[in-house]
Image (cartoon, rainbow, N blue to C red):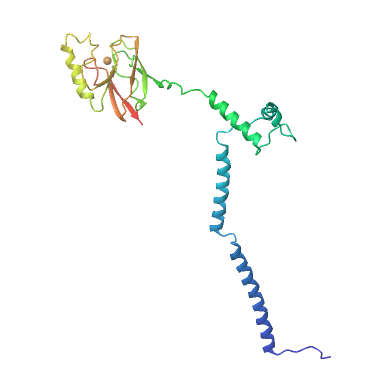
Amino acid sequence: MNNTVDSSPLQRLGIFLLGLMVFGAFGVVAWLGFKVSGGDNDSNYAKWSEERIAKVKAINDAQVGEIIPTDSDLENFAISLGGKKPQATKKPVPGTKVFDEWMKKQAADQAANAPKNEEPKEELVVKLILKAVGNPPGTMKFEEADITAKAGSKVMLTFENPDVLQHNFVLVKIGKKEAVGALADAMLTDPEALKKHFVPTSDDIIASTKLVNPSQSEVIEFTIPKEPGDYPYICTFPGHWRLMNGTLKVTN
Ligand SMILES: [Cu+2]
């Protein structure tokens, strides 16, 4: 039996090329379709995302300042409207005129009942505690080598003196420890020194306590400087400041 159709190599090549063309044509059509439709390319995705975000934003913006009514709120309002009562249900349906009126009425009521501009609240007072070292007695040091406070804040500082000597707390401007310390030492010869609680008269002093007796304490209130930095504090009893000093770290 020899009924097979024999084809020449040229015919086979022709069929092969035809197949290749059909395959390629499908590919081109698919690619074109993808391009024309926009496909899932990045620019389209970004555009669609922007549109979605804009829609959500519009919905959110429309709701700002509005109140979400409860079911009973809506029902009571519908009943109060009497003749305008919606027929199908007693509840105003969101999106209807009645519902919008209800929302407006609630917003107006809320605005009318809103508290008037309140008095500005009292500034926050931060409490700080500073102690003289009491053990061993006569150490002439502050227990805290540094304390921290926020620039411009109001502080209530408690200075405790458990020592056997008298001490005070004097806060001075940045870099003025030595200058004020020298004035403190000079008070040894000042007949008014005790009256002044051994606090020198100087523009470099920001805040100070009186001379605090052993086992006593004093509370002072003052405002922390607005400029951040390291503000020294010292005890201005003559001779103490060289040992008895610390740093108030003023931060933003
Ligand atoms: Cu002292």
The image quadrant of residue 134 is top left
Q: Quadrant of the N terminus?
A: bottom right
Image coordinates for residue 38, horizontal then vertical, percent: 58, 61
- Residue 1 is left or right of residue 212, and the answer is right
| Residue found at the far left of this picture | 189
Q: In this rendering, is residue 121 above or below 15?
A: above
Which of the two residues, 179 or 122, is positioned nearer the viewer here? 122
Q: In this rendering, is residue 245 above or below 196?
A: below
Would residue 68 be visible to someone looking at this image?
no
Q: Quadrant of ligand 1?
A: top left
Image coordinates for residue 147, horizontal then vertical, percent: 35, 24
| Residue found at the far right of this picture | 1
- Residue 2 is left or right of residue 7, and the answer is right
Q: In this rendering, is residue 191 above or below 208?
A: above
Image coordinates for residue 35, horizontal then vertical, percent: 58, 65
Which of the two residues, 167 or 218, is positioned nearer the viewer here? 218
The image quadrant of residue 244 is top left
